[in-house]
Image (cartoon, helix red, strand yellow):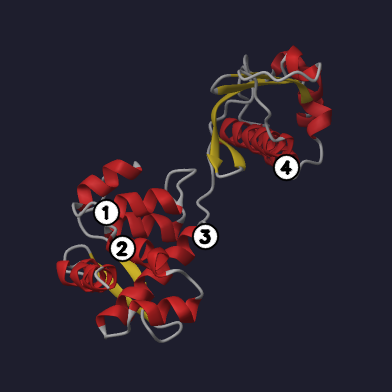
């Protein structure tokens, strides 16, 4: 923390970082570092085949305990924060004791862990993103996507925008801007459902991208990397739990120009009244 913040004065250049997020990032990254070293025979300066299996078991056990936050204090020496990076220094003697080897036997640099990170904001929420993160779907994005598909299906079958708005407790303008999420490219929708979308992606980001009709351009705007030739995404129909398969190789009903016209037509009729 900057000296100004410590003294209670405002500092526009200073950071207030969420401590819990930093601790989680540190634990995850140390665990990943030790697991990778165990898998690649990188724990010792001179790997010994006769003791490799036992050493790997101890390393994996230590990594699991650190990931749970149980023994972090025992092996952590210091954490250095800099713009865009966290450098973690482990206590070499303590690490050696946990692995039941001599400190000098450890591989050079094993006690130093460096990880890039970024501070992502979503409204008032601040998130630290760094290291190798698990793929976890964002429930807010998934729910918004499923609502958009449901609204578009109902609009195409003749349900009016005002009726949908009254039933679901939203302003008509909200549905008008959120229903086009159903027109996002199959690759974007798959990333949202699998939790592999860029960290910090918001519903507002999706709405801006959905205003673009070109799928490739949508993916560029959202930072979705190009991938497979054929993708399939789950599309939830009117029946609860019912799932159809949409393929990028075939025209997907929610993403067709007719579907867009159905939504824009309702919007247009509403705006002229």
Asked which secondary structure carries label 2, the reply is helix
Do the CB atoms of the residues marked 3 and 2 lie less than 8 Å apart?
no
Which quadrant of the figure contains the C terminus?
A: bottom left
Residue 172 placement, left or right of 113: left
Q: Nearer the viewer, mark 4 or mark 1?
A: 1
Q: Which mark is residue 61?
A: 4
Which quadrant of the figure contains the N terminus?
A: top right
Q: Depth check: 201 or 84 in front?
A: 201
Residue 52 placement, left or right of 7: left
Asked which secondary structure carries label 3, the reply is helix
Do the CB atoms of the residues marked 4 and 1 lie less than 8 Å apart?
no
Asked which secondary structure carries label 1, the reply is loop
Residue at (38% x, 78% y) in the render: 162
Q: N-terminal of the two: label 2 or label 1?
A: 2
Cα–Cα span, label 3 and label 2: 16 Å
Q: Nearer the viewer, mark 1 or mark 3?
A: 1
Q: Depth check: 69 or 222 in front?
A: 222
Cα–Cα span, label 2 and label 4: 48 Å
Residue at (65% x, 20% y) in the render: 14
Residue at the disc numbered 2? 180
Can residue 225 be seen from the camera position used here?
no
Residue 97: x %, y % from top left: 82, 26
Cα–Cα span, label 1 and label 3: 20 Å
Residue at the disc numbered 3? 140
Cα–Cα span, label 4 and label 1: 49 Å
Do the CB atoms of the residues marked 2 and 1 lie less than 8 Å apart?
yes
Residue at the disc numbered 1? 211
């Amino acid at each position: 923390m900057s000296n100004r913040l410590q003294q209670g004065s405002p500092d526009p250049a200073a950071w207030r970082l969420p401590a819990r997020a930093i601790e989680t990032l540190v634990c995850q990254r140390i665990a990943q570092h030790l697991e990778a070293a165990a898998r690649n025979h990188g724990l010792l300066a001179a790997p010994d085949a006769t003791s490799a299996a036992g050493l790997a078991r101890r390393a994996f056990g230590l990594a699991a305990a650190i990931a749970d936050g149980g023994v972090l204090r025992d092996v952590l020496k210091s954490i250095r924060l800099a713009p865009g990076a966290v450098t973690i220094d482990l206590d070499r003697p303590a690490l050696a004791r946990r692995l039941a080897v001599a400190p000098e036997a450890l591989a050079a640099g094993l006690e130093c862990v460096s990880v890039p990170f970024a501070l992502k904001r979503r409204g008032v929420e601040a998130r630290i993103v760094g290291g190798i993160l698990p793929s976890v779907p964002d429930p807010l994005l998934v729910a918004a996507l499923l609502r958009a598909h449901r609204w578009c299906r109902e609009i195409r079958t003749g349900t009016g925008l005002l009726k949908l708005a009254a039933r679901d407790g939203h302003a008509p303008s909200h549905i008008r801007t959120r229903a086009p999420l159903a027109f996002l490219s199959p690759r974007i929708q798959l990333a949202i459902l699998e939790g592999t979308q860029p960290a910090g992606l918001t519903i507002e980001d999706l709405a801006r991208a959905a205003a673009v009709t070109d799928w490739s351009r949508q993916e560029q705007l959202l930072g979705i990397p190009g991938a497979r030739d054929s993708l399939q995404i789950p599309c939830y129909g009117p029946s609860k739990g019912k799932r159809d398969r949409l393929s990028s190789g075939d025209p997907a009903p929610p993403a067709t120009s007719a579907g867009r016209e159905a939504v824009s037509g309702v919007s247009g009729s509403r705006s002229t009244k």
